[in-house]
Amino acid sequence: MAADSLQVSLRVAVLAPTGRDGPLTAQILGEAGFQTLICPDMAGLEAAVEEGVGVLLIAEEAIAPGGQEKLAKLLRSQPPWSDLPVLFLARSGVDSAAVAAALQTLGNVTLVERPVRVASLLSSVRVALKARERQYQLRAHLLEREQAAEALRQADQRKDEFLATLAHELRNPLAPIRNAVEILRLSSSDNPATGEVCSVLDRQVGNLIRLVDDLLEVSRITRGKIELRMEPVELAAVIRSAVETSRPLIAAAGHQLALSMPAEPLIVRGDPLRLSQVFANLLNNAAKYMDGGGQIWLNVRREQASVSVLVRDTGVGIPAEHLPTIFDLFTQVQRSKRMAQGGLGIGLSLVRSLTELHGGSVTAHSAGAGCGSEFIVRLPLTQAPIPTSATRPPAHVLPSRRILVVDDNRDAAASMGRLLHLLGAEVQVACSGPEALELLARFRPAVILLDLGMPGMDGYEVARRIRAQEELKDILLIALTGWGQESDRRRTREAGFDHHLTKPANLDTLQALLTSDPMS
């Protein structure tokens, strides 16, 4: 609060009997350094309180009949932070009806009996103003908290909007990539090498999709509420996936990676993607913080009912003073300029969080700067069997249905059309809302896969126009979009869509939808 504003808010408002009482009181208070405002009546007192005062000084006889009720109502209307002090000047004795009513109804009342000594009056005013000043400090504190809370709310809203837009922009290019992988798989089903490449691509696209989905759950991640998809998994498969992820970074730096794993299968219960993320993070850290041509070892060994995975390198090492905090969020050990490729300091924190969510632990060791680092992840073993479906079943041929694909992304539209054609459907492609509506009359599709965020006429408007025509009511409308928040799903339901799929669509899910609904 500005000094001038505070001075006004700490005035003493005086409601005294007519005559010289008010000016005389103001003179005494003014000589003591208090700013005083004389109020001629209750209306003047209400105006003063509205503008801001520090204490009310009210003579008993100055309150007209009914005035005490008005004063009590005025004080009750104060904001929650305010408890305006009232100094009530009463005639000698406290047994008058006015005094009793004041004590009962006015709240923060200090009774001052007359005749009053000037020193006692000034002391009472000073104490009341000190209390009032603390109330203004509380108001300022509450206002700061409200402003901070509003700033956080707006920042959180902007973050959600940014993440939703980012997820949408990332999903759009992933859709034609996945479609192309499926086309390649279906076109070269008899070529083992192509099938292996398709499996790698499909697995890595799936990993990207999971990570994109997690962008929309960043608040849950920061609260440690990542959803794990737990299942029995062979640790060797997890390690292979992590190495596959980190291999380009390791190779680019000219490092050597030595793997040592027991021949026996080691089964843990966990989320394969998240466990792979743990070990890929450790391998990436080793690759980044090491001079070119370094060495990395990854050793897996059984320890009774648990398994340990050791990742060791010949890199820059960790100073002893940093070891206790190396897994803390946003912690980074000082690196040399030539190794200034570190991230935000969340990788090792994520390693620890994910490992602990799997019932395991992780420790770090280093002999010091320049002596390399060693990280050991320990996970409990399980006796549960691994699911037998090691390979993905072949795609089912679709019934001969007419399907219209509508998407302003031409790669996404063309690749989805090609994929559905290979599966046996009769397909037409449109790249805008008006084009889709024009095709309806002559193509008469049974199913429409419809993007939402198209320029000009968006997917919602196309869906509403389709549902407005009685002869088109049986068309199966499926939203295929990069927008996947609950608000987006609610809007598609309101626009008349039957289903909502986020890009890139899982082929098994799409096939299930296209085969479960009867033809129109």
Image: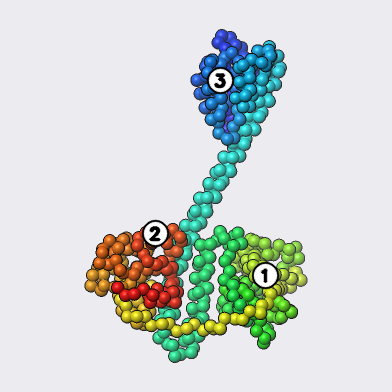
Q: Exactly how many numbered labels are in the figure?
A: 3
- Say which of marks 1 and 3 sits in front: 3
Picture residue at 49% right of the left edge, 70% below the top: 209
Picture residue at 65% right of the left edge, 84% below the top: 265
- Mark 1 = which residue? 359
Q: Position of residue 80 (x, y in %)?
A: 58, 35
Question: Of the residues shown, which amino acid type is indicated by label 1?
Answer: Gly
SS assignment at label 2: helix
Screen quadrant of the C terminus: bottom left
Local crowd at mark 3 within 10 Å, few (<14), some, or many (≥20)?
Answer: some
To which quarter of the image does residue 382 belong? bottom right
To which quarter of the image does residue 283 belong? bottom right
Q: Position of residue 26 (x, y in %)?
A: 60, 16
Q: Position of residue 359 (x, y in %)?
A: 67, 70
- Mark 3 = which residue? 68
Q: Nearer the viewer, residue 454 or 59?
A: 59
Question: Of the residues shown, which amino acid type is indicated by label 2?
Answer: Arg
Q: Are marks 2 and 3 in contact (CB under 8 Å)?
A: no
Screen quadrant of the N terminus: top right
Left or right, 497 with respect to 268, comes to left
Left or right, 504 with respect to 361, comes to left
Vertical side of 72 occupied by 220: above or below: below
